[in-house]
Amino acid sequence: MSTFYDSSTAPDPQTWLSMPPREQIRLMRNFYARTDSSGTSQLQILLHVSVETRVASGHGPTRKAMLRLMSGGLSRQDAIAAICQALLAAGVCDIPGRASLESDVNRALHQL
């Protein structure tokens, strides 16, 4: 199992997906500690793990948004942050009677 994470390089998808969530979260906490991001919340860490998992699992809208944002000049870390914001906005805005959350997430990612 990997003991190091760096947002500038995508983790090996097979390795990332084979890790228990607890290990993914530990790696992410260590990453933020190394980058002196003392204001990083647990929610940010969990969202970041979610984005890496979506990318590693081949989630089309997430991968496309990542490529679009990075080809537009954002660093991988900034692209992940933008996707985290889209995931959070789609989740927070989930209202009864709306279409599925996943379609809202995909729409938000497409708009990035």
Image: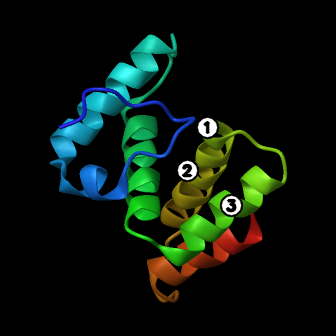
Give the Cα separation between the discs numbered 1 and 2: 10 Å
Viewer-proximal residue, 11 or 27?
A: 11
Mark toward the viewer: 1 or 2: 1
Contact between marks 1 and 2 (CB within 8 A): the answer is no
Q: Which residue is mark 1?
A: 77
Give the Cα separation between the discs numbered 3 and 2: 15 Å
* Quarter the N terminus occupies: top left
Q: Give the colour scheme of this rendering.
A: rainbow
Side of 37 relative to 64 (left or right): left
Q: Residue at x 61, y 37 (%)?
A: 77
Side of 61 relative to 91 (left or right): right
Q: Which SS class for mark 2? A: helix
Amino acid type indicated by mark 3: Leu
Amino acid type indicated by mark 1: Gln
Q: Which residue is mark 2?
A: 84
Q: Residue at x 51, y 10 (%)?
A: 36
Q: Is residue 38 visible?
A: no
Viewer-proximal residue, 56 or 82?
A: 56
Percent x, y of residue 61: 58, 74
Which circle's residue, 3 or 2, is located before the other in the chain?
3
Percent x, y of residue 93: 55, 66
Q: Residue at x 37, y 50 (%)?
A: 12
